[in-house]
Amino acid sequence: MKKIVIIGSPGAGKSTLARKLGPMLKINVIHLDRLFWECGWKAKTRETRIDILQKRIMEKQWIIEGTYLHISELNLKAADTIIFLDTSPLCCLWRLMKRHREYRMRSRRDIPKGCTDKLTWFRMLKVLTFPLHGRRTIKQTLHNYNSKQIFRLRSDNEVEEFLALQVQDADDKRGSSFVASVAIEKSLVSTGR
């Protein structure tokens, strides 16, 4: 996993998963909300967003979190791994309300500088109706990327199990590279090099 996209409903846990996965895999995290909006929640144009995304996907490794379905083809095509957080709408709504209370007048790392958390009726309705529109669109879109490694995580337990597997894989790789380097050293010593 070198190029990872994390998608899902607002409040699904995309930013949280990206913040945990980034340091674990030693990969830079890109928050699309932070790139696609300006101070005061002024939206950048579609063309500007596409330009920004095209430049970022050229990087060697990344974790991109954010669901912008109208331009997601760029990062989905470039990704080797797609993580779809298919969290229940009520859980997402609860998380949005909790996050709003916590960050009401403060900025967060995953949103643009000079912006604060917004909780509107429209946003809450968008979360509650996500299964009718967003989930359906994502599921249809993912059928186009069968060659990618796709994870569909539906609960906090599945996310924790996924993270535990990543830790295990990282430990296994470190162990196998240690074993390989010891084997190379032994080979060099035995041949007198």
Image: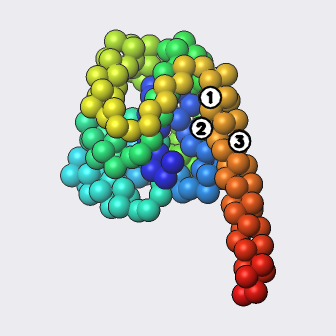
Number of residues whose C-alpha sits closer than 10 Å to that of mark 2, classed few (under 14), some (14–19) or many (20 or more): some
- The residue positioned 45% from the left and 41% from the top of the image is 81
Count all numbered tags in the image, as a single digit.
Answer: 3
Task: Please name the amino acid that badge 3 sits on.
Answer: Gln
Frontmost of labels 2 and 3 is 3
* Gap in angstroms between the C-alphas marked 2 and 3: 17 Å
Disc 3 to disc 1: CB gap under 8 Å: no
Q: Nearer the viewer, mark 3 or mark 1?
A: 3
Asked whether 38 or 55 is in front, the reply is 55
Q: Earlier in the sequence, mark 3 or mark 1?
A: 1
Q: Amino acid at mark 1?
A: Val
Amino acid type at image mark 2: Leu
Check if mark 2's residue and mark 1's residue have beta carbons within 8 Å.
yes
Q: For the view shown, which residue lies furthest in the front direction?
A: 191
Relative image position of residue 164 (x, y in whole percent): 70, 35
Q: Is residue 174 visible?
A: no
- 183 vs 56, left or right, is right
Quarter in which the C terminus is drawn: bottom right
Q: Element at badge 1?
A: helix
Mark 3–mark 1 Cα distance, whole angstroms, equals 14 Å
Which residue in the protein does label 1 denote?
A: 159
Q: Earlier in the sequence, mark 2 or mark 3?
A: 2
Query: Residue 17: which numbered mark, if any?
Result: 2
Residue at disc 3, secondary structure: helix
Residue labelled with disc 3? 168
Taking the spot 66% from the left edge, 44% from the top edge, the residue there is 169
